[in-house]
Image (spheres, grey):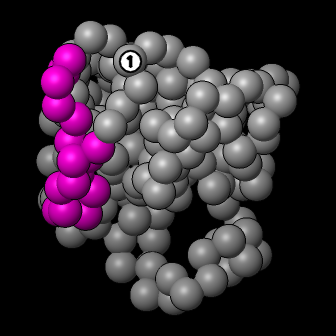
């Protein structure tokens, strides 16, 4: 999944990290339980995005759950990462947007020509982990952020321990 050279290069300042664990075919609940059981955490959307953009992760491990939990409806939006919850403003429709501090496409409207923009996929309301998909051959897919996957959907997960 990651070479030792890539780990050292990509995760400078993460010397306490001892291991990445990849598990596949898990629901959101199972992914969260595995992270807790292993005394680790699921990589956040922004961390996974960084690895995608650097071509560090092998595309065969995707799609992945992220450690970024998003709860939204027509009136409210909350992001939870690393046990911290903040209110957010989410665009009303799918499309290209600039990233916010979580790497989510919740900024100003943009377009596919902006390499720092991400494509938002959403529903009217949802509560769950953000998902990332990635196909190496298509630069657009590496920038898609899925804010609508159901909790029973089975995806992979990358757990950070240390």
Tell me if residue 75 is in the magenta stretch: yes
Image vertical order of residue 33 relative to residue 140, above or below:
below
Q: Residue at x 33, y 50 (%)?
A: 67
Q: Which residue is mark 1?
A: 92
Query: In screen coordinates, is 161 left or right of 99?
Result: left
Q: Residue at x 51, y 83 (%)?
A: 14
The residue nearer to you, when weighing 48 against 158, is 48
Hey, which quadrant is residue 61 in on the image? top right
Q: Can residue 88 be seen in this snapshot?
A: yes
Q: Residue at x 60, y 29 (%)?
A: 109
Hey, which quadrant is residue 69 in on the image? top left
Quadrant location of the C terminus?
bottom left
Say what secondary structure mark 1 lies in: loop
Image vertical order of residue 17 relative to residue 107, above or below:
below
Residue 149 position within the rendered picture, expressed as x and y whole percent measured from the top left: 33, 19
Image vertical order of residue 20 relative to residue 139, above or below:
below
Tell me if residue 11 is in the magenta stretch: no
The residue nearer to you, when weighing 39 against 102, is 102
Residue 17 position within the rendered picture, expressed as x and y whole percent measured from the top left: 45, 79
Q: Residue at x 21, y 47 (%)?
A: 87
Q: Residues within 10 Å of mark 1 (few under 14, many from 20)?
A: few
Hey, which quadrant is residue 16 in on the image? bottom left
Residue 142 position within the rendered picture, expressed as x and y whole percent measured from the top left: 68, 33
Q: Can residue 155 be seen in this snapshot?
A: no
Residue 37 position within the rendered picture, expressed as x and y whole percent measured from the top left: 16, 59
Give, as a single range, the part of the protein colored magenta: 73-88
Image vertical order of residue 3 relative to residue 100, above or below:
below
């Amino acid at each position: 999944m990651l070479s030792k050279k890539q780990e050292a290069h990509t995760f400078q300042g993460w010397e306490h990290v001892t291991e990445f664990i990849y598990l596949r075919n898990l629901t959101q609940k199972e992914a969260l339980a595995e992270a807790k059981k292993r005394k680790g955490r699921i990589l956040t959307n922004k961390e996974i995005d960084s690895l995608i953009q650097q071509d560090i992760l092998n595309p065969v491990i995707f799609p992945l759950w992220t450690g970024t939990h998003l709860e939204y409806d027509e009136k409210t939006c909350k992001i939870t990462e690393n046990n911290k919850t903040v209110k957010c403003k989410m665009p009303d429709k799918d499309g290209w947007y600039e990233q916010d501090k979580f790497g989510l496409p919740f900024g100003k409207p943009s377009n596919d020509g902006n390499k720092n923009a991400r494509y938002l996929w959403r529903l009217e309301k949802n509560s769950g982990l953000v998902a990332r998909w990635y196909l190496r051959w298509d630069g657009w897919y590496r920038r898609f952020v899925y804010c609508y996957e159901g909790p029973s959907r089975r995806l992979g997960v990358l757990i950070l321990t240390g």
